[in-house]
């Protein structure tokens, strides 16, 4: 459903337009003043604003300027309406960003045609912005490991269909990236991709986020608010961490999947949509079903084509390509020369277990780049102590007992220096060493005072 805001100080015009536009299937709200309009626009986005140029508390053109300064993804198309229109006013309004100009008394046929065109113009603009945002995210899966090659092949086979996909994987493995890759190679690639993180939204709000809310159904909702299902119409809806959804919401999702229809919170009329659904989870849903936390019938609806994203520890040959990609991305982001990585540092990263998967690796690389602004290459000493400790716990990373002991000592000293906030004298006290002795240890282990 498209939403229109009518701003006019004449009550009969507001009431007539509200009645006609609702019959045409629009969601409509109205305001008699610029102040009322500002409050409504802050509360919810609108596709189109029908704006009178003469308002009791403001010039309509000033309101037009304010609307045109809204973020591009929430900015409505504005149609100026006036009973005292002139060519000069119309030209000025167009230069300020108005979509069109209508003279009073309004022609019903022309008003509906212009409104329909404005809605389409906004749809194209927002979808274009969404496409740019999507493809600013790297939708290419980086790496040449066997599990990743198999995943790419599965995406190529499945993406052109409308089959529902359930993506399994630990946190940080890149489940959203897989979903975006499926969408980018699907027949719906020219339509919108909408994401809803079920784990990030409180249970009391998830139904409203998913299905939308009708005017007055909840405290503070002065206008109709579209949910993610309605916004994803024609495109792809990605339900991230679907295993965290409540049983009550699961029942409604199941009904919406069966009929491609749903009723907004507080609504009476069901809406029909055409949405491809992709879901993800880091839980064992069959185990959740046994515990009574997840509906078995919903599981079988979602699990048409299961995808399994391997954890980073099972495809460590992809660590090198990922590190180089992140270094390039962060270098451009921070305006820095491209950094390289030494073989020794890369070997440390290969030995680490990566419980946080690709997300953790990305965070580590960003931290290293930020904390070492003058370095042109990542060395072993630049890596966080956590990665060294993980290697020190095993024997694979060292060729001798002395090498393992040195690694442990280095990490322990670094930790105490950090606790002492880089005060070497204070760190020596914490370690129970003479300051000169600590300096000799630091020199032998390759620790600089800056660390």
Image (tube, rainbow, N blue to C red):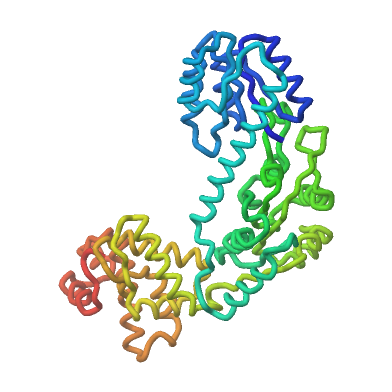
Q: Which residue is found at the position 54% from the left and 17% from the top?
A: 35
Determine if residue 319 is in view.
yes
> Quick one: quadrant of the C terminus?
bottom left
> Quick one: quadrant of the N terminus?
top right
Task: Indicate the position of residue 119 as horizontal and vertical percent values.
Answer: 64, 33
Q: Which residue is found at the position 31% from the left and 60% from the top?
A: 371
| 248 left or right of 68 in image | right
| 91 left or right of 275 in image | left
Q: Nearer the viewer, residue 192 or 110?
A: 110
The count of marks equals 0
Q: Which residue is found at the position 64% from the left and 32% from the top?
A: 117
Is 399 placed above or below 366 here? Answer: below
Q: Quadrant of residue 309?
A: bottom right
Is 132 placed above or below 87 here? Answer: below
Q: Quadrant of residue 210?
A: top right
Task: Indicate the position of residue 104 as horizontal and vertical percent values.
Answer: 63, 12
Residue found at the far left of this picture: 436
| 174 left or right of 253 in image | left
Determine if residue 194 is in view.
no
Q: Which residue is found at the position 66% from the left and 51% from the top?
A: 198
Is 236 placed above or below 173 here? Answer: above
Task: Indicate the position of residue 52 as horizontal and vertical percent values.
Answer: 58, 15
Residue found at the far front of this picture: 87
Task: Indicate the position of residue 357 as horizontal and vertical percent values.
Answer: 52, 68
Q: Nearer the viewer, residue 39 or 191?
A: 191
């Amino acid at each position: 459903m498209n939403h229109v805001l009518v701003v006019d100080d004449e009550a009969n015009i507001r009431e007539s337009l509200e009645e006609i536009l609702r019959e045409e299937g629009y969601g409509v709200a109205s305001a008699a003043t610029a102040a009322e309009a500002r409050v409504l626009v802050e509360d919810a986005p609108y596709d189109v604003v029908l704006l009178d140029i003469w308002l009791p508390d403001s010039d309509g053109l000033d309101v037009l300027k304010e609307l045109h300064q809204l973020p591009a993804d929430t900015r409505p198309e504005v149609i100026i309406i006036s009973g005292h229109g002139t060519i000069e006013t119309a030209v000025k309004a167009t230069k300020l960003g108005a979509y069109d100009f209508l003279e009073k008394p309004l022609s019903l046929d022309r008003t509906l045609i212009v409104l329909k065109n404005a809605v389409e113009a906004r749809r194209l603009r927002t979808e274009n912005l969404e496409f740019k945002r999507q493809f600013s995210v790297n939708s290419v899966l980086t790496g040449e490991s066997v599990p990743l090659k198999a995943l790419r092949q599965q995406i190529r086979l499945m993406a052109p269909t409308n089959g529902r996909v359930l993506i399994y994987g630990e946190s940080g493995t890149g489940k959203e990236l897989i979903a975006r890759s499926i969408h980018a190679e699907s027949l719906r690639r020219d339509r919108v991709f909408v994401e809803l993180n079920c784990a990030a939204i409180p249970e009391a709000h998830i139904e409203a986020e998913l299905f939308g809310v009708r005017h007055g159904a909840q405290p503070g909702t002065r206008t109709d608010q579209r949910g993610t299902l309605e916004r994803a119409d024609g495109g792809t809806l990605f339900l991230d961490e679907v295993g965290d959804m409540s049983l009550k919401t699961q029942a409604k999702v199941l009904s919406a999947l069966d009929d491609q229809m749903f009723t907004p919170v507080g609504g009476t009329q069901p809406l029909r949509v055409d949405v491809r659904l992709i879901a993800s989870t880091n839980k064992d849903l069959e185990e959740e079903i046994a515990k009574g936390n997840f509906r078995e019938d919903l599981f079988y609806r979602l699990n048409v084509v299961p995808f399994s994203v391997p954890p980073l520890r099972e495809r460590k040959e992809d660590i090198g390509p990922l590190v180089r990609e992140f270094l390039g991305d962060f270098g451009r982001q921070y305006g820095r020369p491209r950094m390289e990585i030494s073989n020794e540092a890369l070997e440390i990263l290969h030995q680490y277990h990566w419980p946080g998967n690709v997300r953790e690796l990305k965070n580590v690389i960003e931290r290293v780049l930020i904390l070492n602004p003058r370095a042109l290459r990542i060395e072993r000493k630049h890596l966080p102590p956590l990665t060294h400790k993980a290697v020190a716990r095993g024997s694979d990373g060292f060729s001798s007992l002395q090498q393992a002991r040195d690694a442990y000592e280095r990490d322990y000293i670094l930790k105490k220096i950090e606790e002492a906030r880089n005060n070497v004298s204070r760190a020596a006290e914490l370690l129970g060493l003479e300051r000169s002795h600590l300096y000799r240890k630091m020199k032998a282990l390759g620790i600089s005072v800056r660390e």
